[in-house]
Amino acid sequence: MKGKGSYTKGLISRCTNYKDSDIIFTLLSEQKGVQNFIARGAKKPASRLSGHIEPVNFVEIYYSSKSNLPSVSQIQSIDSFLKIKSDYNLLLQSQYLVELSEKFFTDISDSKSQLEKLIETINQLSSTSHHKLIILVYEYELLKSTGFGLQVFDCLNCSRNLKKSSNYFSYFNNGFYCLNCLKEASPSEELIKFTVEDQIVFRSIERRDYVGISKLDVSDVLLKKLSDCLKKSISNILGVQLKSSRFL
Ligand SMILES: [Zn+2]
């Protein structure tokens, strides 16, 4: 191929129509994190680019890197996740994972391995029925890999090992207070009581004990509680609630 272009692979997170026939899209690229591209003429029926540009498509693109908004001249789908897209709920869940990842992608040093984890997680959604648990594990580990991980073994205030008892979760500080330190929390800090059983799932994810997690009988009520806590931590870190999280 002529010219000084580059190839990269990535997952499309967003697309916007531009002018009459162009599409601008955002790619979670394995090399440079979040990148925007323009596909000129992609909306024309005869364009070879058109069928490949949609959210939650894993693609390889060839682009020229001369401007802030590089122009794509070739695009090829590696995985279009057709199984996911044939199920509306799976698609909503995948869009949430992609939107969440995009927000944190610039803080991640190794975007290639994060992209692999994201693709693996989306594929897991279509192969099991434990969707909420899979999303929870992904959210938990994404926070950890971007330096916002939860503190689940030691108290936020005294740093002592948390006793095997009820402890109090603070999404404002991403961790737990022991009973002795409850009075040290700020009055405006919303605290949520976690029983010993409630704490097992976060502790298992922290230990990467996935076999152990799969054997736990996590009730829907507990799963919702853990998921709500993580989503509150995430919106606290980002300063906004993710649009796609409202539909989960
Ligand atoms: Zn303490």
Image (tube, rainbow, N blue to C red):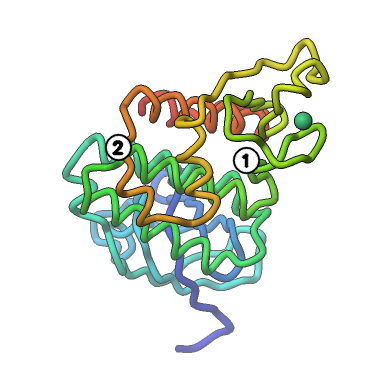
> Which residue is outermost to the front?
164
Find the residue positioned furthest to the bottom. 1
Q: Is residue 14 visible?
A: no
Q: Which residue is mark 2?
A: 217
- For badge 2, the amino acid type reads Asp
Residue at the extreme top of the image, as rendered: 187
Q: Position of residue 164 (x, y in %)?
A: 58, 34
Q: Give the alpha-carbon distance from disc 2 to disc 1, as whole Å.
A: 20 Å
Q: Position of residue 209 (x, y in %)?
A: 44, 56
Camera-nearest residue between 86 and 199: 199
Residue occupying image coordinates x 51% and y 52%: 26
- The answer to whether the residue bearing label 2 lies less than 8 angstroms from the nearest atom of ligand 1 is no
Q: Dot 2 surroundings within 10 Å: few (below 14), some, or many (20 or more)?
A: few
Q: Pick the residue in front: 58 or 73.
A: 58
Task: Kindly tell me whether mark 1's CB lies below 8 Å from ligand 1.
Answer: no
**Residue placed at 64% from the left, 45% from the top?**
149
Query: Percent x, y for residue 81?
Result: 25, 56
SS class of the residue under badge 1? loop
Q: Quadrant of the N terminus?
A: bottom left
Q: Amino acid at mark 1?
A: Val
Q: Which residue is mark 1?
A: 152
Residue shown at 53% from the left, 55% from the top: 207
Where is 238 relative to 185, above or below?
A: below
Using the image, determine if residue 30 lies above or below residue 54.
Answer: below
Q: Provide the secondary structure element on which disc 2 rests.
A: loop
Pick the residue in front: 78 or 105. 105
